[in-house]
Amino acid sequence: MKVLLVNPWSLKKFNVIVIPNISLGYLAASLMKAGHEVEILDCVRDRIDPDQFESRIRENPDYDLIGFSLFTTYVGAVKKYTEAIKRINPRIATAVGGPHAVLEPVETLEILTDVDFGFRGEAEIGICQLVEVLGMEADPYGHDRLREVDNLVWRDKGGEIVCNPRVMIDDLDSLPYPPWDIMNPGKYPLAPIGVFSKRRKVAPIIATRGCPYPCTFCAAGKMSGKKMRTRSVENILDEIKLLVDKFGVEEINILDDNFTLQHKLVEDFCHGLIDNNIDITWSCPNGVRLDTLDAELLKLMERAGCYSFGVGIEWGTSKMLKITRKCVTLATIREKVDLIKANTNIRVTGFFMLGHPEETIEDVEATIDFACSLNIDRANFFNFSPFPGIVEYDKLKREGKVIKNWYDSLYINSVVYTPRQMTRQQLVNLQRKAFWRFYTRPRIFFNILKEIKSFSQFMVVFKKSMRLVFVHGQ
């Protein structure tokens, strides 16, 4: 069977992070292992909009299945992509997976009427089962065999949407590595996540899945389950060796939600890098929890090549930390930030959130003050966005304050929701004030300048700075 996996591009054409799509990589690897022909099309990297996508499919309309990675922001785009597919060849099966399909499985197929199948969980096993049904049945749509496909969402013969039970993959080592030969990290831009990378050729990996924390503003636990599942250190190191030896990768981005939760995993990983003389730098751009860090672990991480990570601070008031079940105090945040700086030179980026439904202008001002008082090197002030799966989304939806056409605008750097305590323009102004106050301080400004090593890095910094100052919030 011939399969195309697509990383779609938002209709808003946001200046999004451009990295290899690891999730599609794992699906491709599983399908290839089962003997299928697979291509990956990265519409974000290659800037392929729905019209250009339609032209490509017209040139090659013989796929058996085309699958899309579906984030909430891409719902409108995927609708246009799949409409084009069905216009060209209605016999091509279409499928979606990813966060939005997992968190809103029924609504996804209700909105995306040209999508035949969805996956409401990890799809590495299920997609191979689905392709097997597509290949064996003359009329696979609505067939009873679809009930046996792990995590599948589908329509029965009567048009009713059926959600198969969710199944998690416990043994992550059983999954083949993403096919890096068709996801060549060398074809992706400098500093794919954030403003800087320490070395030129960067690749992302995932070491764990799962999140046990109850934060109300995050859907990680619903997406990947509360149970932490980990790859073996040997499995992780072998993939890194492959990336270094075959593809010349010099830096690794670990994209886990909770990489430092299990100290033994991190310790063994660091010792493995050191003992095997694997010459890489690495970072955790998605962030680590501050309350999982201690001095010895931090020193070992730095010795093994870690030079940067994000930390989820979110708010600068005890009120907001309590309301959102962050399970950390302002005192702990300050203590742990000081601990990092006292023991290492690891660069710290603080993540903050503005515009929560319970937040006042005074709360936002307190968060800005707190951010500027911490000994961190970077800060990102995201807008609260009512993404499906978070507690606040369910509450706002019950109150009739979430409308479907928000999906195309839902983006952490756009103001699509404003709490009742302030106007939209006030929130936009507060966000710009936060960036201005944080980055115009001499210590921060000149340290960033010192990190610029080339003209290409300067252009990355310049373009992203202009977006923060002039476009953020729009």
Image (cartoon, rainbow, N blue to C red):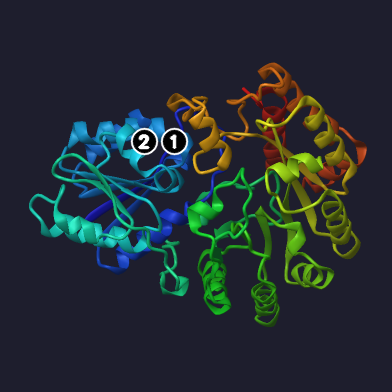
- Compared to residue 265, the image places residue 4 above or below, namely above
Q: CA distance from mark 1 to mark 2?
A: 6 Å
Label 1's element? Answer: helix
Give residue 41's position: percent from left, percent from top: 38, 46
Depth check: 364 or 76 in front?
364
**Residue 318 in sight in this render:** yes
Depth check: 7 or 295 in front?
295
Give residue 181's position: percent from left, percent from top: 42, 61
Characterize the local packing of mark 2: few (<14), some (14-19) or many (20 or more) Cα atoms within 10 angstroms. many
- Compared to residue 226, the image places residue 218 above or below, namely above
Q: Quadrant of the C terminus?
A: top right
Say which residue label 2 marks.
78
Q: Residue furthest bottom?
A: 275
**Answer yes or no: do the residues labelled 1 and 2 have beta carbons within 8 Å?**
yes
Q: Quadrant of residue 429?
A: top right
Depth check: 3 or 222 in front?
222
Residue type, label 1: Tyr
Residue type, label 2: Val
Say which residue label 1 marks.
74
Depth check: 234 or 154 in front?
154
Give residue 336's position: percent from left, percent from top: 84, 58
